[in-house]
Amino acid sequence: MTSSACLFCRIAQHDVPAAIVLEEPALVAFKDIHPQAPTHLVIIPREHLARVSDASTGHAALLGGLLLAANRLAQQLQLQDGYRLVINCGPQAGQTVDHLHLHLLGGRAMRWPPG
């Protein structure tokens, strides 16, 4: 299920251009338009799910697929020195698009705490 009003659904359907780096039946990964690191990808499920807090046990394969895709991409991009995975949930956490997405950031040292 997708939402015609959702930017990320429209990217997954190729209705909005994006620098797509991975397409699979269940997910799409593309370069972030406002990168916060030398490598900054956004990984989304094709299924529209607004937030990770909306996920249920029925979404376990979807959530696992996002993490496994991030791992494969990090290996392909040779981020062996480390990378960060981020899922923002809600506007107070910095989520700006209401579609579950995972950020893969790498290519520089990350600081703690983030944000």
Image (spheres, helix red, strand yellow):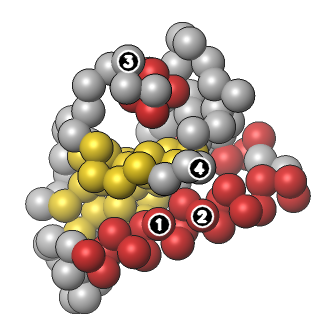
Q: Nearer the viewer, residue 57 or 10?
A: 10
Is the residue under label 1 in contact with that under label 3 (CB below 8 Å)?
A: no
Q: In terms of secondary structure, where does tag 2 sit?
A: helix
Residue ID for mark 3: 15
Q: In terms of secondary structure, where does tag 1 sit?
A: helix
Q: From mark 3 to mark 2, how far is it between C-alphas?
A: 23 Å
Q: From mark 3 to mark 4, how far is it between C-alphas?
A: 17 Å
Q: From mark 4 to mark 1, how far is it between C-alphas?
A: 10 Å
Label 4, residues with CA under 10 Å away: few <14, some 14-19, many ≥20: some
Q: Measured from the top left, where is residue 48 in percent x and y?
A: 64, 32
Q: Which quadrant would residue 18 be assigned to in this image?
A: top left
Mark 3 or mark 4, which has the lower sequence index?
3
Q: From mark 3 to mark 1, how far is it between C-alphas?
A: 23 Å
Q: Is residue 36 visible?
A: yes
Position of residue 21 relative to residue 112, above or below, is: above
Residue ID for mark 2: 65
Residue ID for mark 4: 26
Label 2, residues with CA under 10 Å away: few <14, some 14-19, many ≥20: some
Residue at 78% across, 53% down: 59
Question: Which image quarter is the C terminus in?
Answer: bottom left
Q: In terms of secondary structure, where does tag 3 sit?
A: loop
Q: Which mark is residue 69?
A: 1
